[in-house]
Amino acid sequence: MSEKSLSSQLEEYLPRGMLKLVRDAGEKASELGLELYVVGGVVRDLLLGRANFDLDLVVEGDAVKLAQELAKESQARLTVHPHFGTAKLSYTSFSLDIATARRESYSHPGALPSIKSGSLTDDLCRRDFSINAMALCLAPQRFGELIDLYHGKDDLDNRLIRILHPNSFIDDATRILRGLRYEQRLGFKLEPKTDELLRRDAAMLDTISGDRLRHELELILKEDKPERVLKRAAELGVLTKLHPSLRGNGWLSNRFSHARQACKRTSPSPLYLCLLIYNLSEEENEQFLSRFNFQKRLAQAMRHTLQLKTKLHTLANPQLKPSDIYQLLRSYTTQAIQANVLAAESPVVSQHLQSYLARLRYVKPLLNGEDLKRMGVPQGTQMGAILDALHRAKLNGEVKTREEEERLVHILCYTL
C-alpha cells in the first residue's frame, strides 16, 4: 500500500506556516484516534514540482470533530457541513478543506453519486485518475508516507493520464473533460486504454446536466492555454458532444492567443466564450445557451457577439464619422465588441471597433441637462434632441470647449 516517505519533500514544498499546521493536524488526529491524509492534486503537484497549496485533507473518522478541535487551538474560522462530513478551516492566507473518507456509488450513468463514509482505500477508489488518487499520511510516526494504490507515481513518471476502472467515464462523463484538461496542462498523454475508452464513451456527456458541463467548460477556460484542450477535444470527437457545430481549430487557437493579450488585467474567459461560439448561427447559439444555462450577463454578451457580427458590413466604410460608429455600437456589450475586433477580417472594421472601445464610448459633452435648463432650454423632447446633437458634435470634434458647446446650444435652440 505505501511506497515510500516523502516527508523531506513535503517539508521543503509547503510554506513554513502551512507545514506546521498539517503537522499539528496530524498529531491532533492521532490523539483522537483518527488517521489524516493529504490527498489529490497537492500530492500530484508535489511529485511534479508544481506549486499548489490548495490542501485537501481526508480523515478516516469524524472530519468535523477534528476540524472543531483544530479551530479551538488555532483561532481559524470554521465552516462545517455535517451532512457531508466536511469542514473548512480558513486562515489569514490560506484554507484547509477536511473531509471524512467516503465511498461512492452511481445509480445510473451521469447521476450524482450516493455517498457513505468509508476508508482511505474507498476514498482513493472514487477518484478520477491514477495521478489524482495518491495520498500522504500525516500521522506523526508515518509523516509523508506515500499511499499509491493505482501506481499514480509511475504514471507521473511516464507522463500518462489513466482512469482507475473501465466504467469510469460511464459513471461520470465529466471525467472526459477533466482528463483532457490535465493532459494538456501537464503535457501528458492519455494512456492507450484510457484513450480508447474515452472515445468509446464520449456520447456519455449527454447524461451530464448542463450546469455540470458548464462548470467543466469554465475550468477549461481558466487554463493557461485552453485552446489546446479544445483542439484535443475536437480531435477525439468530444467537442461536438457539447454542440455539433463547435470547432477547436487553428482559427480559434489564434483568436484565443490574441484574447489573452487583450485581457492582461482581466479574465479572458468571457471573451473566450464569445469567440468559441463565433461561427455558430444565432439559432445554434440559443441551443448552446439553453443547454449550458449561462448567467444572464454572459449569455447577453454571446448573443450580442453574433448580432454585431451580422452588422459588421456597416462598419466597413472608412469615411464613417465617429458619431456614426458610436451609434452603431453603443447598444452592444464590451465583450461582444472585443470578440468582433479579434474576429473581424477587415482592418477598417477592426479599426472602427477599436476606436469605439478605446475612445468614443468615453466621450461626453461638458454640458448636461442642468446646464441646459440654466440656459433656458425647457425639459422635454427639445432638450433631449439638443443633448443628442451636442454629443454627436463632441464625438466628431466639432466642439471642444465649454464656450463652443454653449454656442452650439444657442444655435440648436433655434433650429430644433
Image (cartoon, rainbow, N blue to C red):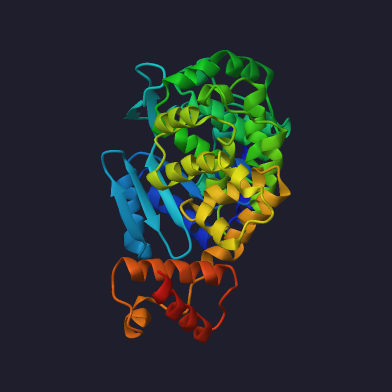
Where's residue 38, x and y in %?
A: 50, 44
**Considering only vertical position in the picture, is 174 above or below 354?**
above
Query: Viewed as shown, does residue 361 lie left or right of 237?
Result: left
Q: Quadrant of residue 57?
A: top left
Q: Residue at x 51, y 86 (%)?
A: 403
Q: Residue furthest front?
A: 414
Q: Quadrant of the N terminus?
A: top right
Where's residue 113, x and y in %?
A: 36, 26
Q: Residue at x 31, y 61 (%)?
A: 72
Q: How many marks?
A: 0
Residue 228 shows in the view: yes
Q: Nearer the viewer, residue 322 or 127?
A: 322
Q: Residue at x 41, y 17 (%)?
A: 109
**Considering only vertical position in the picture, is 271 above or below 253?**
below
Where's residue 227, x and y in %?
A: 65, 38
Q: Nearer the viewer, residue 215 or 252?
A: 252
Where's residue 242, x and y in %?
A: 51, 26
Q: Residue furthest top?
A: 200
Q: Quadrant of the C terminus?
A: bottom left
**Considering only vertical position in the picture, is 129 above or below 346?**
above
Q: Quadrant of residue 298?
A: top left
Residue 145 shows in the view: no
Query: Viewed as shown, does residue 80 lie left or right of 96?
Result: left
